[in-house]
């Protein structure tokens, strides 16, 4: 049988995404973002995002079909993000997907957004059943920071460690706000950090003290976990100190030192977890995987530890429909039953 042609729909936050894949081949990844409408509020406003999805869905779908040069008739299955995310935003994509499924009679798959961030890494694989043995995933986004073990991407994903407070992307966004860099903060800090000296200031690496780490034999309570809220507070204190002394705030140095603290602790704990848990292949995913320093240091440390790292191209790291289609195709190829049309979006899906 030829590889399944799968249409994926993403609407969990501010990106309306429609992607089309054939098995593990990417045909198109069409994304429309309402980010411009949220910028002046300094964060995504759920109501505005939902309305923007309503406006953008049909044009985005049409553009995707045209670019892939296929019709709805050609599609074998439809996949849609059903959670986690903003409830109203998810609702638009899920309703659109159900309507398409009913109108065309195609099977519909409900997709976990976080697993899709990881599943997108399979698109650059060549063969049909590509999941390597001993696979892990480092998922770093605006809502999540997690190290996962993937036994079967379709239904057996175990969390080894995660943030206990802010996600890494959230920390980037909050620190960017403190530094007056606007929203979204990740790309702004990434750019500015290149002009700064990361060693000028040393910010704390959360949960790295022995009482949290323990040892390989007797792990502490947070050996593979992260915490970024203390780091954000340390940046705020640092800015206050410069201001109190009437000195110019060295924004680029602070951005670089903050970024180094985040990236250092993410990569060191992820590599530790992989080494101790026998994980030899890692997929990097999530919006913060677009970060240049994270990509660089993860590559270096994985390679030093003998771990093979799979990094998706930049456009597939932030939210998009292709990742949903990619995971949907895996479900189809694994012979998993479709979800039907009676499932509800779940904004807090684990
Ligand atoms: O995965 P994503 O698009 O949405 C969520 O599911 O959260 O991730 C968005 C997050 C935002 O916090 C944004 O600031 C961050 O990813 N981000 C970055 C970069 N590009 C996006 N963080 C650091 N460096 C970047 N280059
Ligand atoms: Zn995401």
Image (tube, rainbow, N blue to C red):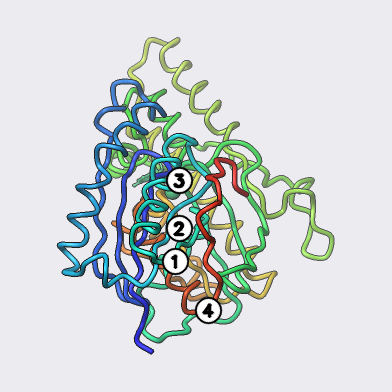
In the picture of the structure, the residue carrying the numbered disc 3 is 260
Q: Which mark is residue 173?
A: none
Report how many numbered discs are placed on residues in the image: 4
Label 4, label 3: how far apart the Cα atoms are: 40 Å
Measured in 3D between alpha carbons, the distance from the residue under mark 2 to the one under mark 3, in whole angstroms, is 23 Å
Going by the image, does 253 lie left or right of 214? left
Label 4 lies in ligand 2 vicinity (Cβ under 8 Å)? no
The residue identified by callout 1 is 107
Where 243 falls versus 101 (above or below)?
above
Q: CA distance from mark 4 to mark 1?
A: 14 Å
Q: Earlier in the sequence, mark 2 or mark 3?
A: 2
Separation (CA) of disc 4 from disc 2: 19 Å
In the image, 106 versus 85, the foreground residue is 106
Give the mark, 4 or 1, whose residue is nearer the N terminus: 1
Label 1 element class: loop
- Image height check: is 21 above or below 234? below
Residue drawn at x 57%, y 37% is: 228
For the point 26% across and 28% down, the residue is 37
Q: Nearer the viewer, mark 4 or mark 1?
A: 1
Residue 222: where, in percent of width, then height? Answer: 73, 49
Crowd around label 2: few <14 · some 14–19 · many ≥20 (10 Å): many
Residue marked by disc 4? 334
1 or 3: mark nearer the eye: 1
Quarter of the render that holds ligand 1: top left
Q: Is mark 2 within 8 Å of ligand 2?
A: yes
| Discs 2, 3 touching: Cβ within 8 Å | no
Q: Secondary structure at mark 2?
A: helix
Q: Earlier in the sequence, mark 1 or mark 3?
A: 1
């Amino acid at each position: 049988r030829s590889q399944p042609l799968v249409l994926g729909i993403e609407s969990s936050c501010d990106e309306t995404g429609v992607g089309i894949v054939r098995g593990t081949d990417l045909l198109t990844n069409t994304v429309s973002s309402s980010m411009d409408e949220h910028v002046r509020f300094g964060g995504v406003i759920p109501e505005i995002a939902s309305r923007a999805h309503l406006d953008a869905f049909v044009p985005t779908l049409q553009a995707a079909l045209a670019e892939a040069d296929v019709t709805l008739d050609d599609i074998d299955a439809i996949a849609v993000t059903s959670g986690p995310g903003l409830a109203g935003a998810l609702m638009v994509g899920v309703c659109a997907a159900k309507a398409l499924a009913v109108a065309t009679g195609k099977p519909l798959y409900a997709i976990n957004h976080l697993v899709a961030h990881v599943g997108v890494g399979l698109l650059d694989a060549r063969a049909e059943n590509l999941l390597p043995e001993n696979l892990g995933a480092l998922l770093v986004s605006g809502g999540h920071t997690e190290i996962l073990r993937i036994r079967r991407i379709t239904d057996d994903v175990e969390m080894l460690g995660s943030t206990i407070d802010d996600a890494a992307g959230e920390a980037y966004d909050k620190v960017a706000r403190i530094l007056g860099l606007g929203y979204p903060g990740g790309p702004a800090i990434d750019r500015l950090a290149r002009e700064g000296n990361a060693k000028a200031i040393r910010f704390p690496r959360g949960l790295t003290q022995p009482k949290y780490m323990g040892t390989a034999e007797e792990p502490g309570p947070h050996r593979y976990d992260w915490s970024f809220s203390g780091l954000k507070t340390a940046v705020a204190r640092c800015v206050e100190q410069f201001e109190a002394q009437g000195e110019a705030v060295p924004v680029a140095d602070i951005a670089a030192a903050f970024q180094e603290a985040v990236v250092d602790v993410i990569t060191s704990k992820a590599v530790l977890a992989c080494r101790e848990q026998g994980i030899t292949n890692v997929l990097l995913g999530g919006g913060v995987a677009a970060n240049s320093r994270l990509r660089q240091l993860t590559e270096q440390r994985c390679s030093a530890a003998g771990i093979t790292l799979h990094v998706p191209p930049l456009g597939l790291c932030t939210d998009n429909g292709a990742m949903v289609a990619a995971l949907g195709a895996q479900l189809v190829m694994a012979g998993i039953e479709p979800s039907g049309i009676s499932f509800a979006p779940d904004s807090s899906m684990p």
